[in-house]
Image (cartoon, grey):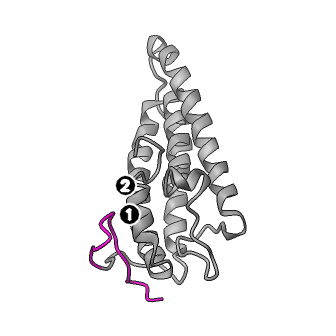
Amino acid sequence: MSAAGGAPTDDPGAAPSRLPSLGRGGGGWVGLQAVFLCAAIPTGVLGSNWPPATSHWLALPGGVAVLAGAGLLVGGGAGLGRQLTPFPRPVADGVLRQDGIYGLVRHPIYGGALLLILGWALLSSSLALLPLALAAVFLDAKRRREEAWLVEQHPDYAQYRLQVPRRFIPWVW
């Protein structure tokens, strides 16, 4: 597999990805992802709290986002089973998962992480919305790099992308 092949967008006929591999298995993507995701913790702790009148209204959606995020993370990990890897390059002998949560969304683990950050921001501080926005942009780029590798390894991935248009969060995004 070449590090630059595949389709970077949801268009199956798109040009090869221009995103770098950042290491053999994409380890650089994992390191950067950790920075973006972990930045939510101190921003939520150190940022000013939501106003009391607002925080009461944000508690329920914040809790729902945390639970939904945890569900996506667990469902995505369980769906991959032994194929689960922190790296964006798929395992060499892996099978394309199209059932379970992967029948609803292509990257539930990324979506789960984003929902966890959203929930944390709603429960803690508006400042935590900043790393959420940065993580969303970053994870979308990582998704494009990963999907380019998936197209190389699984020629039917292009059709799967058309059948499952949501990238991160079922019925939403």
Magenta region, residue range: 1-15
Residue 131 in the image, given as x and y percentages of width and height: 44, 46
Circle 2 residue? 137
Q: Are marks 1 and 2 in contact (CB under 8 Å)?
A: yes
The residue that appears at 61% across and 67% down in the rendered structure is: 86
How packed mark 1 is, by other alpha carbons closer than 10 Å (few <14, some 14-19, many 20 or more), is some
The residue that appears at 64% across and 69% down in the rendered structure is: 85
Q: Is residue 49 visible?
A: yes
The residue that appears at 45% across and 10% down in the rendered structure is: 53
How packed mark 2 is, by other alpha carbons closer than 10 Å (few <14, some 14-19, many 20 or more), is few
Q: Secondary structure at mark 2?
A: helix
Up the image or down, 127 lies above or below 98; here it is above
Circle 1 residue? 141
Disc 2 marks a residue whose amino acid type is Val
Question: What's the magenta bit mostly, secondary-structure-wise?
Answer: loop
Question: Disc 1 and disc 2: Cα gap in Å?
Answer: 6 Å
